[in-house]
Image (cartoon, rainbow, N blue to C red):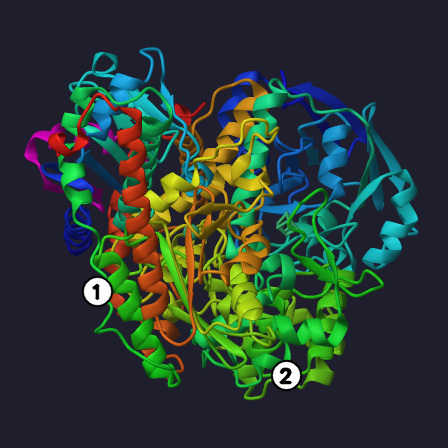
Amino acid sequence: MIRQIEKYADKLYADGSALPGRTALLAQDDCLLTWGAEELFSLGRAIIERLNVVSLVLAQPALPFMELLLQRVAEAETQLVPLDTETRTFLHDIPLVRKSDFSHADPQHLVELLGQRKGILVEGVGILATGSVTVEQAYINYSSVYHAVYVKTLFDLLCAAPPSETELQLLQPLWAQLEQPIASRVADLYQGELAEKSQILAAMQQAGLRTVELKLVDSFFGNLSCGQGDQLYISQTGASLDDLAGCIDLVPNDNSSTAGITASSELIAHRAILAETGAATILHGHPKFSVILSLLCDETACGITDCWKDCAKVRYLGPVPVVAGEVGAGGIAKKVPPVIAQQGIAVVYGHGVFAIGQQDYRQPLEAMIALENWCREEYLRRLKLRCPQMNLQETL
Amino acid sequence: MKGWHGRLLNIDLTTGRSWPEALSADLLQNYLGGRGLGVRLLRDFYQLDPFDPEMPLVFAVGPLCGTAAPTAARLSVVSRSPLTGTIYDCSAGGRFAWRLKAAGFDALKIVGRSSAPVALGITPQGGEFLPADQLWGRRITETVQALETKGSVAAIGPAGENRVLYANIMMGEGNSVGRGGLGAVMGAKNLKALVVDGQLKTSIVDQQRFTEARQDVIRLFKASPVIYGDLGIANYGTPALVDLMAQRRMAPTENFRKTVFADADQYSGPAIRKAFQPKNHGCYGCPIQCKKSLQDGTPLPEYETVNHFGALNGINDLRSIVNSNNLCNQLGMDTISAAASISAWGEARGRFPRAEEIGALLQEIAARQGDGDQLAEGAKRLTQKLGKPQLSMSVKGLELPAYDPRGAYGMALAYATSNRGGCHLRAYPISHEILRKPVATDRFDFAGKARIVKIAEDCNASIDSLVACKFSFFGASLEEYAELLSAATGVEYSPQALKTIGERIYLTERYYNQQLGFSCQDDLLPERFFTEAGSSGDGIEVPPIDRSRFEAELQKYYRIRGLDSQGRFIQADFLEQQP
Ligand code: SF4
Ligand SMILES: [Zn+2]
């Protein structure tokens, strides 16, 4: 179990979501194991020992989203409603606790909230998330909350009150990150038609890993597939993109075997896309700025309230189409295939990006990188327009 | 009270009396309903012999039954199992549960023994005793047809009448209260059938909140490949698992001598679809509808059944398997235990039965004639009589289902700790070890499994008390069900609170079992799994289970449960401290 803890602690740092020194991981087997920032242990212990769970992450997000969020939401607000659809589906609302509402010595209030939800936001501590099966599960729940907070905060800077100077200052490290576009590091990936099983599996693992290394996505969010004749290789449900060895299913198109019941929940969408476009490969992930910008809509007289599933329009991010649709057996499989061939890439409202390749994973990965870079630039452009009195360049 | 009615109907078959009794809000809130309520109601009776007339047979619904909560039109039947000797509960779906709730009762508590065969009519007015001499000896469909004008039927077949130790209680639509032989308990009471009718509504406190929680659940179902995926159970039923278990090399074959059956594709989900173009059906009101049937409505077998009447007996004939399933349903007995008993017998005498012999054997079992009389006692007693007890692939006398423990170590541990014996559903580690829900775990590793099993046992005890279907939890979690429950009852429940209730129920059952003489000696797997390898191949090694690792993890489990190293309760007054 200690191996598990170390593995996911490394991941939290590697993906840049948790602040070193302000992160702790606790897990209980028949005894309690702790890792990370010691000053969080007593709080962590007081919580985990009162919950019927396996693991607990307590971590300050690496970027100061908590501060922004707490300043922005009304004092009386007790929860955050995620804008991205995956988090909304799996975590619902995320409780928000202020310093004044709990004590480190007796965190009963936090225990109760974590007894209800898989992740919560706590002023001064950060994100707390639990897992009732594995350590990985607490990591996944942490990542989901982090993703939700990231998307919500940056979306609000564009669409709610414009950012104050202090906020822009606080986000300095983010602006610095955005200054560097994501490198289009694909030249060393498998090139050309993927034919052999071993080659396909290797190419899929390589592409998944690269997508994570480039910080396009957090490792847990995404899936990929490769069609081969009348069958399809696809990553399994809940598989980490950077850890795909042994986690790829082979699924015959005629459903003559159901062994692929463990395949990604997006199997239906992958099948439909390959059938419609004749592509060979698909890469799906949740790059943050593509997700954030997909939420922007200029419509003023639209009656739809659940845009993420009910919007019938095709909107565009630059040339890239954006459609709405639910995960899994919902709408993605219907909405994405008709539009994805235009640019080889399409965005799902508040969810993520699908990109296709004619042969290998270079093409979809490049397209995803290009789109995310475009979205980052577009985000900054729009932000500058919102605060003309400020020179964002100077703040940078 | 909302969600619950706060009423139980007592029935005494000896005296022919029935009378309602109030159930306190306190009791219901602490035990929910279903399994929890049933187990609590047995507190003063669990030490009785299963066939003692005074041993209660409890039918209990839950607070979500009668609402639009997905998969919640279910009940649990609770008593003591004649097969295992443990406290026993089994959950079943169907219109019967819904109607029982609509008759205004949270539970039926049946005691006594009728002097002649009897059927019980249950309406909001109470119980009515209907003579059933004419029905005695009849199969399930005939029995249901004779009574269904009066409402929804639950009945026993010849197997229950003849006290086959794994006789089922069958619901009219084909759902079964299976495994532990509660049909024999019913038979021992001379009770052939129950028929319930009622139109009362289950009222809900906060409709808006309930509707939102329901939408959350449905959204999670849609996002779950196991449920609504192209290859999931809504499309193929549980036989969707045949191909997966073959690929994972953990499909019990020839009484667990092997773990791969070359002809499993003859009865896989796709093979069944091709052969029969089945209709979807399922438990009443369930949006998943995982059950499949022939066009005429005859239910098709579940995964465990196809494997056990297939691989476990070395049979590859799909039609024979469908027949066996059908016969068991008609005779009213458990498919897993019937097939596993036949398989153990087959290995003991050096020959597994041929497909065409199975039908006659099943009839002999139900009638307790010929070899059937021994087979009706279950694999453990049967193999003991034959002097080959090591061939009983059972835990606490309950025959193991179709997940070989050498292929999933959490499952190995959970079979051992299950307080109703060798059952996969108590902790259901297959969910994470094989189906990757809610997250994947390493199936060939014991690390961490003790606590995972403990937590899952607690969760499932509360799920069985709501009563919801385990399959919901391939998508949803206790979070959404706690929300449904809070919205329905107006009592605030969190997932943590539900786990605490589940823990109470689980420990109560274990305590009863301890008082009945069960000890750590019974938390054990058959020897075969520690000494013989499974069928390795395709790059998958299936070694025997490392006994010392298994035992170490079992010790961890005891510690996490707060038990001593012998698996015993540390506080002698555990039961007195429970509400
Ligand atoms: S999922 Fe299947 S077993 Fe469960 S309630 Fe629905 S139909 Fe019944
Ligand atoms: Zn996605």
Does residue A154 appear to the left or right of A181 in the view shown?
right
What crowding class fits label 2: few (fewer than 14 Cα within 10 Å), some (14-19), or many (20 or more)?
Answer: many
Residue at which label 1 appears: A185
Percent across and percent down for residue A106 are 20, 18
Any mark on residue A221, and which?
Answer: none
* Discs 2 and 1 carry the same chain letter: no
Q: Nearer the viewer, residue B275 or A357?
A: A357
Task: Note whether ligand 2 is within 8 Å of mark 1.
Answer: no
Percent across and percent down for residue B574 are 36, 30
What is the CA distance from the residue labelled 2 to the residue labelled 1? 52 Å
Any mark on residue B316, and which?
Answer: 2
Q: Chain of mark 1?
A: A
Residue A92 can be seen, yes or no: yes
Q: Nearer the viewer, residue A170 or B184?
A: A170
Residue drawn 27% across the image and 53% down it: A216
Percent across and percent down for residue B367 are 77, 67
Is A258 rendered above or below residue B450? below
Is B406 rendered above or below residue A62? below
Span shown in magenta: A25-52
